[in-house]
Amino acid sequence: MNAKMIDGLLPAGRDVMFADIEVTLARLVRDGRRRKRSHARALTATVIVVGTQQRLVAAADALEQLGETGGVRAILISEGTHTEPVARITETAIAISGLAPKYLNNAVAALRLSSLPAVVWWRGGSVEAFGDLADLADRFIVDTEQPDPVWTQAVELFERTALTDLRWTALTRWRAALAHLFDLPQVRRGASGLQRLTIDTVDRPSARLFAGWLRAALRPKGTLPCEIRDVKSEAPTPLACVRLEGGGLSIALQVRESNACLEAAVNAVEDARIVPLGEGTLASLVGEELGVRTRDTAFEEALVAAREIPA
């Protein structure tokens, strides 16, 4: 074996050659059943995580937390230059360190369970390898620190897989809170007069995605001027405040002082609504996405619009 295994990744696992993965995995599962004297939990999906070595550790921890409520086979792959990299396995997870990108497709095809849905969780890697996995994925979750190079290619994959971004998942409560305000008659009447959007954020790509969603929903043939401001926040959410103004309306969504709730209001005090922000942890966000199987056209339209907003 000619690559160093990631420190902290599957510490209880066993290192094996790639060709011996399935045989060793079957033995581990069989031995585990004997020790526990019970049937193993039924697997519901194969989750393929591709990313830098450091980001794979957090992903493995998140999937282990999800393992308490639903079983997945996790395949964790970091890129490198090796054709025969180190592989470490446990009963439900396989970690491959330093795999050459051109072998990524072959490794995933060999290790995924063809009888189960395959979910690709892309946490980083060479852009060239990004699109290669689309044909193997029933669901493709983008989760990169610098998403623009991937977003450019992602638009081309909409017809090949059900693609989304974990930032979109983190914006679910913000989108739902704003959508509920548009159920109010006075907001619907004044929507066409909205002229300005201001977003305070700790993550500019998330703000661009939210702004893209609004532009696609409110102005399909035009634009909504947008100002994105960087702020500091300890809330478990990428946005801190969103304001829409114009046409006699002032709509505001902002994190309350407790950092646990989101307040949505029209004209400062009218029709104020409070909703919980939720955990916002990596495990909770991924768990939410693993329950989705279909395409999300609202996300696709938002991503197309977001790419037109300056980074």
Image: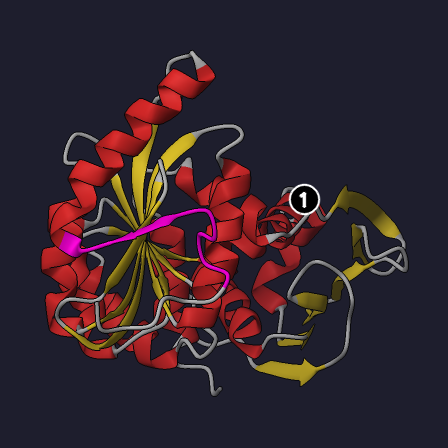
**Residue 4 appears in which quarter of the rendering?**
bottom left
267 shown above or below 245: above
Residue 246 on image: x %, y %: 69, 71
Q: How is the image coloured?
A: secondary structure
On whether residue 15 falls in the magenta region, the answer is: yes
Q: Is 260 in front, or is 213?
A: 260
Q: For the stretch drawn in magenta, what is the main secondary structure?
A: loop
Residue in view at x 78 percent, y 61 percent: 254
Image quarter hosting the N terminus: bottom left
Residue 61 in view, yes or no: yes
Badge 1 marks a residue whose secondary structure is: helix
Residue in view at x 29 percent, y 23 percent: 30
Where is mark 1, residue-wise? 185
Amino acid residing under circle 1: Pro
Residue in view at x 63 percent, y 83 percent: 227
Q: Which residues are magenta?
A: 8-18
Q: Is 264 in front, or is 85?
A: 85
